[in-house]
Amino acid sequence: MDVLKIDAAGAEADILDRLGSRLARTRVVLVDYSRGSLRRQVDALLTGHELFGAVVRSPAAGTLKYVRADLLG
C-alpha cells in the first residue's frame, strides 16, 4: 500500500494495531490524533516508520505524517 490515511475519532491506534504486519508494507501513513496519549500509541505502533511531518492544531490534536524508514535512506 502506498498511502494510508486514518481519521477514526479516537480509534486510530486500534486500527493500526489490527493492520499488524501490513503496516510494514505501507509507504506513508497519515494519522489524525485527538489526545496526547493517542499520539504516543501511534508512535509505538509505527516502529518501522519515521515521523516526517505534522500539522498541529492544538497541543492535543493534529495530523501526523509517517514515512517508512527504509525510504528515507
Image (cartoon, grey):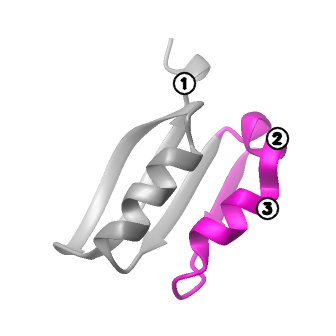
Could you tell me which secondary element the residue under label 3 belongs to? helix
Mark 2 and mark 3: Cα distance apart in space: 9 Å
Q: Where's residue 63, x and y in %?
A: 39, 66
Question: Which mark, residue 18?
Answer: 3
Residue at (74% x, 44% y) in the render: 23
Q: Quadrant of residue 12?
A: bottom right
User: Is label 3 in contact with label 1 (beta carbons under 8 Å)?
Assistant: no
Quick check: 23 above or below 15? above
Q: Position of residue 47 (x, y in %)?
A: 55, 35
Q: Residues within 10 Å of mark 3 (few under 14, many from 20)?
A: few
The amino acid beneath tag 1 is Ala
Counting residues from the start of the chain, the first of labels 3 and 1 encountered is 3
Find the distance from the CA under tag 3 to the CA under tag 1: 21 Å
Mark 2 belongs to which amino acid? Ser
Check the image and name the residue furthest to the top: 73
Could you tell me how far apart the alpha carbons at marks 1 and 2 are, in whole angstroms?
A: 15 Å
Residue at image point 79% right, 49% down: 20
Dot 2: what SS? helix
The earlier-in-sequence mark between 1 and 2 is 2
State the residue position of label 1: 69
49 to 12, vertically: above or below? above
Residue drawn at (53%, 37%), measured in percent from left and top? 67
- Residue 61: x and y in percent read 29, 77
Going by the image, does 46 lie left or right of 62?
right
Q: Depth check: 14 or 72 in front?
A: 14
Along the line of sight, the residue nearer the viewer: 46 or 67: 46
Name the residue carrying label 2. Answer: 21
Q: Label 3 sits on what residue type? A: Arg
Whether residue 13 appears in magenta in the rendering, the answer is yes
Label 1 Cα crowd, 10 Å radius (few <14 / some 14-19 / many 20+)? some
In percent of the image, x 42 and y 69: which residue is there?
38
Magenta-colored span? 1-27
